[in-house]
Every structure is written in structure tokens, then in C-alpha cells.
């Protein structure tokens, strides 16, 4: 009764969710064997359906439609993992369950990198930091490391790792998610922040979550409360997915 949305979902017998793969939070299984979706976002969506005693209906969305489908009432929750931005907050409310952030890596054998205890300690004139020109980290690197030597390189990909390998740079930024696979492959690399293999980094952090249409206070409160209860499981599942990424 408190939430018209919950009443409507129960009446329909289905919870409609917008899906679009975005690892490690929502992973599509295209093998044709086993469940079609997995990851923490899927786990949370399933918990919502279970508690409402309804079926889950996955509605495919695109990058263009994943937010507008809420206002047009084609889905109840956009479950595709979304970065919380000021623009999006004008039209939707977020149920946050994770965040993206950045790590800095360098050669473990490089004393300049190895002696740094924290990301802060890379902000000095004797450190050279490489980044992709026009890449997502460029603006952040310039703001975060005003005292370091900065080296913009052409190219694209996860990170300009060859700059570190060839010793043209002491440190390079990388998103915390692909870092895990890279660090596993290239044992000669070390990372900052060190704790939990950089998975708790708060550098360049941006919240990630699912979204519901604005002006549904009771529904928002309920979805957030369930997420809070599920958080340990969601974190565990995220780590599980990251460990399987190549």
C-alpha cells in the first residue's frame, strides 16, 4: 500500500528489469547452457523478485535506452550497472552497490615505484606517469599528480603498460577491475593502493548501481534496505566475477 510500484509489480506477478551486460556487475552467458545472467546486479534483482514473490522479466536495453525506459515505464528497475552522475540524478534515483575506481601500477623492481607507500607518494617531480591522451584518466591524472612528470601517449586499451615495461614511465593508471587480470598475467608489476589488491581503492571513485524512476520514496527505501542486507554477498560475487575475467 505504501508503494504504488510494489502494488503494481505484485498485481502483474512480474518484476521488469532492464538488462545490458557490464562486467563485473552484470554478466551475460551466451553459451546457451545454464542461467542467462549472473553477477551481483543479477543476484540483487533476484532477491527483489523473491521478496515480492514474483517472476523476473529481463528486458534488453541499450546504452541509449537504459535510463529513458524508467520514465516510459517499460521497466521497474534498470538493473544494467550505471555510474551515478549529476545528470542522471536529475531523472532517476540510485540503489548503489559498488563503485569504479583507479589503481596505479609500476614495476616491482623499480625502486621509485616500490618505495611509494601510497598513491600520494607518486606526486613528485622524480616520478613519470604515463596515460592515454584523450583517455578517461587524462583529466584525473593532471589534477591528482600536479608535481609529477606527465607523459601522454597515443593509443587506447586498458592501460599503456608498455610505457612501464620499457621504463619510460614509473607509474600508469588502470581501472581496478581489469587490474586484477593484468596483475595476474604480469607478475613483475606492483600496485597502489596495495590493500586487497587495490580492490578497495577510492582513487577517482564513482558510485555504481541500479536505477529506478524518481519520486518513488517507499520503493526507493525498500530497494536500498534490501541492498544493505545483501551487501556482503554482492561484494563476494563481484570479487568472484573479477577473478574469472581474462
Image (spheres, helix red, strand yellow):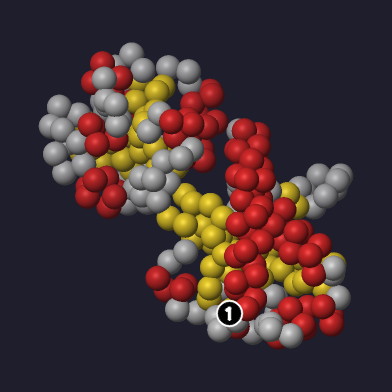
For the point 60% across and 81% down, the residue is 216
Image coordinates of residue 13 in percent, x first then y, are 86, 75
Q: Secondary structure at mark 1?
A: helix
For the point 47% across and 49% down, the residue is 100
Towards the viewer: 4 or 63: 4
Image coordinates of residue 31 in percent, x first then y, are 81, 44
Residue 59's place in the image compared with 175, above or below, is below
Image coordinates of residue 137 in percent, x first then y, are 34, 48
Image coordinates of residue 236 in percent, x first then y, are 64, 40
Q: Callout 1: 10 Å neighbours few (<14), some, many (20+)?
A: few
* Image quadrant assignment for residue 172: top left
Residue 86's place in the image compared with 35, above or below, is below
For the point 36% across and 45% down, the residue is 203
75 to the left or right of 139: right
110 to the left or right of 36: left
For the point 86% across and 44% down, the residue is 33
- The C terminus, quarter of image: top right
* Image quadrant assignment for residue 242: top right
Question: Can residue 32 be seen by looking at this rendering?
Answer: yes
The residue indicated by pointer 1 is 217
Question: Can residue 70 be seen by looking at this rendering?
Answer: no
Residue 181's place in the image compared with 48, above or below, is above
Towards the viewer: 127 or 53: 53
Residue 223's place in the image compared with 27, above or below, is below
Amino acid at each position: 500500500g505504501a508503494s504504488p510500484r510494489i502494488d503494481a509489480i505484485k498485481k502483474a506477478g512480474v518484476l521488469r528489469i532492464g538488462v545490458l551486460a557490464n562486467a563485473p556487475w552484470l554478466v551475460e552467458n551466451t553459451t546457451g547452457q545454464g542461467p542467462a545472467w549472473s553477477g551481483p546486479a543479477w543476484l540483487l534483482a533476484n532477491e527483489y523478485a523473491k521478496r515480492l514473490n514474483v517472476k523476473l522479466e529481463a528486458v534488453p536495453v541499450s546504452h541509449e535506452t537504459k535510463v529513458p525506459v524508467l520514465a516510459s515505464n517499460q521497466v521497474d528497475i534498470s538493473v544494467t550497472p550505471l555510474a551515478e552522475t549529476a545528470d542522471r540524478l536529475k531523472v532517476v534515483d540510485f540503489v548503489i552497490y559498488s563503485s569504479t575506481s583507479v589503481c596505479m601500477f609500476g614495476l616491482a623492481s623499480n625502486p621509485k615505484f616500490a618505495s611509494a607507500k601510497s598513491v600520494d607518494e607518486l606526486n613528485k617531480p622524480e616520478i613519470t606517469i604515463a596515460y592515454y591522451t584523450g583517455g578517461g584518466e587524462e583529466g584525473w591524472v593532471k589534477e591528482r599528480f600536479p608535481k609529477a612528470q606527465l607523459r601522454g601517449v597515443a593509443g587506447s586499451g586498458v592501460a599503456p603498460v608498455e610505457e612501464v615495461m620499457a621504463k619510460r614511465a614509473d607509474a600508469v593508471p588502470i581501472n581496478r577491475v581489469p587490474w586484477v587480470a593484468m596483475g595476474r598475467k604480469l607478475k613483475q608489476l606492483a600496485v597502489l593502493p596495495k590493500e586487497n589488491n587495490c580492490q578497495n581503492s577510492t582513487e577517482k571513485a564513482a558510485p555504481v548501481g541500479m536505477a529506478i524512476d524518481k519520486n518513488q520514496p517507499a520503493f526507493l527505501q525498500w530497494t536500498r534496505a534490501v541492498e544493505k542486507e545483501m551487501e556482503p554477498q554482492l561484494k563476494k560475487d563481484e570479487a568472484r566475477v573479477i577473478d574469472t575475467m581474462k
